[in-house]
Amino acid sequence: MELTIKASGAEKFSGRYDIKLAKGDVKTAAGQDIAAYSETIKIEDTVAPSIVGTEQLTASTVKVKFSEPIADLGAVTFKTASGATVSGTGNGVTLSSAFVAGSKEVVYVLGSDVAANSVVTATFVGAKDYAGLLLSPNPTSVSLTKGAADGTKPTVSEITPVSPVKFAVKFSELVSDLAAADFTITAQTGSATVSNIEQDETDKTKYYVTLSAPIQGLTTIALANQAVTDMTGERSEAVSRIVTFAQDTVAPKVDSAVVVRGTDNKEYLEVTFSEEVTKKSGLDNLAVSGSKTADFVTSTLTGYNVAASNLVPVSGSKTKFRIELAQLLTGVDTENASYNLTITGKDATTTNIALVEDVVNLDSSASFQAQFTRSKDGTVASTNKATINKDEDNDGTVTTSENGIVVSGNNTVTVMFNGELDGASAVNVNNYKIDGAIVEKVVLNPATGTAPNVKQTVTLTLKDGSNSYTGARYVTVSGVKAKNGLAMDEYKTTESFNENVRPVITSAKLVGLDKVVVTFSEGLAAAGATSTDDFELLIGGQKVSSNDLVTTPVVSADAKSLELTLEGNVTAANVQSGLTLKVLDTIDLEDLAGNFVSGGQVTITN
């Protein structure tokens, strides 16, 4: 069995994703639960798009095919074989329909400006896929061929009235160049011109023509000579048809009033009318009355008003309106309550007024009923992934030196993020990689700021001695999730690091009764004053107060050995019992990279 997950619309997968299924989320055809599943995958596009070919659809239309979905078509220019520029608009070379991001092909129509039996070169510059990869090669050119006219002129198959302000015209074949000026409308009652033309979404030979005003009765619709051109370049002849536009006497009514949840996760009362309508001019308020039942108690709602501006048309529909339940139920909004409402339109003088009117200005009734149960509004889940905050000083400007990775000393690195993080993924050491070093510990720091400008940082501690060289290193951060559980895209940058290998004492030798020469594994940084806070003498493994103080001399840069002075002379008995040099926690001797001398004890030899 196979389960396919598809991105929504034009969205594409890119980056790291956590795929998790709980037991029972998916069932077999027999109804059995599929076991729990969890895996992190990485999807990365590194292959540039290309044009894989063309297809001649008709004499005047050519399909251009791409190797993968295209996010941005870039700039396209057209030239004839002689090098003359052909317009990308009007009667030149145009797209058969607007480019939609995510398409793998586009269709070009070679208009009347392009001669039959000729070739136009189309050059694409800057076309990109969803990974931002440019078309390869960039630019790329393809040939678009226009064939000969087929000898058959396009004709009008039928003209059909749809409403007093709209009719449909269907052609015998695909055509182009249809324009409002091509029509002449002569009506028995009323006068109108063409205000808009829309091609049918499924039948591309049909167009819907909207008039500037309603008409009725016998009407002559005339289409001018050569108004349209078919796909081979043949032009239509003049045509005239007589059709009847019926008088509209049916007022719009409410077909339904139901609760729907919007993309914003809010609940709406969606009102659907029987025909195309617009909100009535002068509608000022919606008077709400009725009853509410909550916890088995039914109460009467005294009338209250809601501003009619809250009743808005649904995008893409000419028959639907919506109002948020939170607005409609102002002051009486109760989760899980049932409502039985009467909603009435009112004008500014509180007189009843129609809610909507149709295209011929017939009014709907002023009131309608709505029965529903209220749930509650939700919040829209954030779709923002965790990202690196490159603005290190939070001044609103990211300079070329800022990358969101801040190094402090030789062992501490701060990674800066936008938004609040998921703690478990943020403190996972496996999500941070610094080439040539080992991340030993991760601490998540408190988030700062308020939405939508929340920031959060993590502090990385490098393992002592894991970075042997000073210089630039790749830093890779991946797998860190935002609070909403969305994993970040892998982030890779470079940052300079000092080596963090601490110098160690390789030998300590007694060279005088009160002198010890200490040799280190590497040169030290200069120190301009003597100190008694670096070392301590142990005799027979014990601290002897009369001779435990050790003085470190002035240190020259890159010195690999120092002559230390003891507090007093040691005796043969002291040597016999054993001398040990102990490194104190307060030591401030460091190497040239700033790493303090490693602690511990070393035996003094003679």
Image (cartoon, helix red, strand yellow):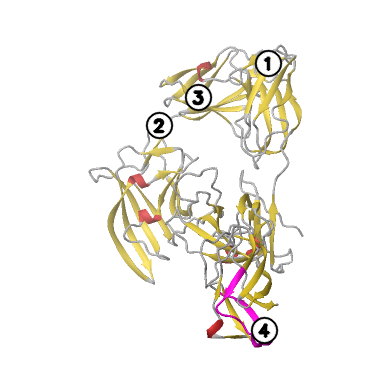
Query: Do the residues bearing badges 2 and 1 touch, measured as CB atoms within 8 Å?
Result: no
CA distance separating discs 4 and 1: 111 Å
Residue linked to disc 1: 233
Specify few, some or many for label 3: CA neighbours under 10 Å numbering under 14, 14-19, or 20 or more.
some
Amino acid on which disc 3 is placed: Thr
Q: Mark 4 or mark 3, which has the lower sequence index?
A: 3
Check residue 360 in the rendering and tell me which mark sits there, or answer none. 2
Q: Which residue is mark 3?
A: 244
Left or right side of 170 for 374: left
Secondary structure type for disc 2: loop
Q: What segment is highlighted magenta in the picture? A: 563-584
Looking at the rendered image, the quarter that the C terminus falls into is: bottom right
Real-space CA distance between mark 2 and mark 1, rounded to the nearest whole angstrom: 39 Å
Quadrant in which the N terminus is drawn? bottom right
Q: Where 10 sits versus 180, above or below?
A: below
Indicate which label's residue lies in the foreground, 4 or 2. 4
Q: Which tag, 4 or 2, sits closer to the chain's start?
A: 2
Q: Earlier in the sequence, mark 3 or mark 2?
A: 3
Nearer the observer: mark 2 or 1; the answer is: 1
- At label 2, which amino acid type do we have? Val
Kind of residue at disc 4: Val
- In the image, is residue 50 above or below residue 575? above
Observer-nearest of 239 and 1 = 1
Q: Residue at 67% x, 77% y: name it.
A: 604
The number of numbered discs placed on residues in the rendered structure image is: 4
